[in-house]
Image (tube, rainbow, N blue to C red):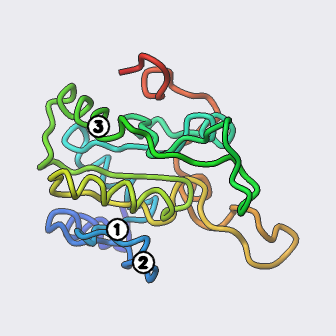
Amino acid sequence: MNNKALIMAAIITLAFSSNVSAAAKPVDPKKQTPWDLYVDSREAYELKIQLGDDALFIDVRDPTEIQFTGFTDIVDVNIPYMFANIQKWNSKKSILKMEKNPDFITDIEKILSKNNLSKDDAVIIMCRSGGTRGAPAANVLFDKGFKKVYVVTDGFEGGTLKEGDNKGWRLKNGWKNSDLPWSYKLNKDKMYYKNSF
């Protein structure tokens, strides 16, 4: 390992061991949490590798979304914060209406118990792009007494390019664009579906 890699590993270890966030605090208040614990996708990967079974890594995307955009087996479980409701239309956004998962907290508590973890242990939350579901999901956990929740600020797919031939495509940062392990093949044992918990 070269000096640059050793220094980076030391910085990451120091940041995570002292509960200091490694990624910058998002400017948008809707993407912020009371803990101010933010990691980008690479840092989330390192944190999960470092903590192993002492942390719960949750993908909060809708399972249908994951089916078409990919998944990482580094995640412990998929528990959607919101579902697309095929019965309702969002005219403002021209998409299916998204509705909160009524079992979100209950399902997380079940997985914590199953994994011999508590609300005092680290939880890592990842959504598609890092803000619209990640921080709101984390904030719900704060209200339920969770002590240490990290939000992956660039999410699974990352941000959209602002110019060029691929303008509007999610090719900027994110788990999928950071040479981290992922696949279109889903792990049935980690996916959220009827009777999965």
Does residue 174 lie above or below 118 as drawn?
Answer: below
Of mark 2 and mark 3, the one earlier in the sequence is 2
- Tag nearer the camera, 2 or 3: 3
Mark 1 lies on residue: 38
Q: Which residue is at 24% across, 44% downward?
A: 55
| Distance from Cα at disc 2 to Cα at disc 3 | 25 Å
Q: Which residue is at 84% across, 76% downward?
A: 164
When asked about the image quadrant of residue 87, the answer is: top right
Give the amino acid type for the residue marked by disc 3 in the picture.
Ile
How many circles with numbers are drawn on the protein?
A: 3
Percent of width and height locating residue 69: 66, 43
- The reply, left or right, for residue 147 in relation to residue 85 is left
Mark 3 lies on residue: 108
Percent of width and height locating residue 32: 36, 72
Percent of width and height locating residue 180: 52, 50
Of mark 1 and mark 2, the one earlier in the sequence is 2
Q: Which residue is at 22% across, 35% downward?
A: 109
What is the secondary structure assignment of the residue under circle 1? strand
Which residue occupies the extreme top position in the image? 195
Percent of width and height locating residue 184: 65, 34
Mark 2 lies on residue: 26
Number of other residues with Cα within 10 Å of mark 1, as a class: few under 14, some 14 to 19, many 20 or more: many
Q: Are marks 1 and 2 in contact (CB under 8 Å)?
A: yes
- Tag nearer the camera, 3 or 1: 3
- The reply, left or right, for residue 98 in relation to residue 18 is right
The quarter in which the N terminus is drawn is bottom left
When asked about the image quadrant of residue 113, the answer is: top left
Along the line of sight, the residue nearer the viewer: 45 or 93 = 93
What is the secondary structure assignment of the residue under circle 2? loop
Give the amino acid type for the residue marked by disc 2 in the picture.
Pro
Does residue 163 lie above or below 14 as drawn?
Answer: below
